[in-house]
Image: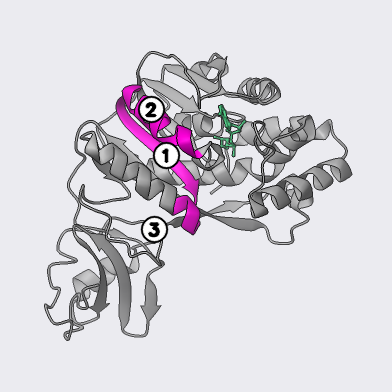
Amino acid sequence: MEIPQQLRSALDAELASVPSKKIALAVAGLSGRYRIGTSCIGRGYLQSREDIIAYMAYRLPATYAATHAALEQVRDRLPDWKPQSLLDVGAGPGTAMWAAATIWPELKRITLLEREEDMIAAGKRLAAYSPLAPVREANWLRADVAGAWETSPCDLVIMSYVLGELPQDRVAPLLHRLWEATGGTLVIIEPGTVAGFHRIKQAREQMLEKGAKSIAPCPHDGACPMTDNDWCHFAQRVQRSRMHRQAKAAELSYEDEKFSFLALSRTPGAAIEGRVIRHPQVRPGHIRLEVCTPGRVTTSVLTRKNREMYRIARDLRWGSVVPPGAMSERSPNGSEPGGCPTGG
Ligand SMILES: C[S@@+](CC[C@H](N)C(=O)[O-])C[C@H]1O[C@@H](n2cnc3c(N)ncnc32)[C@H](O)[C@@H]1O
């Protein structure tokens, strides 16, 4: 995946004004703080204008890719849903807005909440490059989302890579507030780490109690079947531009962003049998899939004996919906690798 051309041009222009050595230094400082999880109390991880430049150079392409991938799962589950309004909470430079506007270009009204004034200014400069008027004319509001804030309800509410930066005692009230502000679907994205998934799992439990319906990645509204020593996450590959490589002093032309997320709606999505939650393991003669299904995580082995299913399984990816019938040959004792054995 690549970030949109206009966003790339906007980033290039933004970063051109700062010497590349300065950017690389700021990136090293910011990535170190993210790695060890230390934010400056009350000010978060972004402590200076250089940090904001560093965020755009080093994190924006990856968080864009993760958000885009999560929203694709939402669109697949709600194919007829066309949100008109978006609320981006803890918007940073407007990353989630760019991703949402790519998936749903019919968005008409966009509001972004962000605490850092310099981040808002940077986000507005980036948005000026968008071909979409609602993105260029979006309403940026300076707000501490951990406190009290007001907006009218929006069809789509996204909070990406923010939950882990909030004081623990503000999380539950904020989730409550987000759901109040959600007319259709709420999407929360976190890093694909054990800690990130743990936050997502807790948020899911809280929201299901309010009657929210799981849209993605979960194929059901039951308890999460993931065991304590495991975590549900996905990965999205994003191409690195030259500027991006320089900023990170990286050799590879791409990176894989790991993320955990949840999308919850006021109405149920199209029913699905399961979702692939690991890279499919393609071995000579069979494909092994780890699938989240209502009630449990199941390992399915599809062999060439079932040609049609085997052909379908070859196209499945980490995050794919399992097509109807793919789970129906599951053997109760897990001993027949002709279909989908080994319950988890
Ligand atoms: C890791 S960045 C994520 C930005 C963007 N959502 C993305 O996915 O790229 C976290 C953002 O949340 C903002 N933030 C953190 N705590 C906040 C708060 N209490 N109120 C408003 N914004 C906050 C930070 O200033 C920063 O811009």
The crowd level at tag 2 (other Cα within 10 Å; few <14, some 14-19, many 20+) is many
- Locate residue 325, reporting x and y percent: 14, 63
Question: Residue 109 sits in which quadrant?
Answer: top left
Q: Give the camera-side residue of 71 and 229.
A: 229
The crowd level at tag 1 (other Cα within 10 Å; few <14, some 14-19, many 20+) is many
> Which residues lie in the magenta part?
168-197
Amino acid under disc 2:
Leu
Q: Is residue 177 magenta?
A: yes
Which residue is depicted at the point 16% across and 84% down? Answer: 336
Q: Are marks 1 and 3 in contact (CB under 8 Å)?
A: no
> Mark on residue 286?
none
Q: Give the camera-side residue of 313 and 115.
A: 115
Amino acid under disc 1:
Ile
Check the image and report above or below for 125 versus 185: above
> Mark on residue 232?
3
Judge from the rendering whether residue 124 lies leftward or rightward of residue 208; answer left or right. right
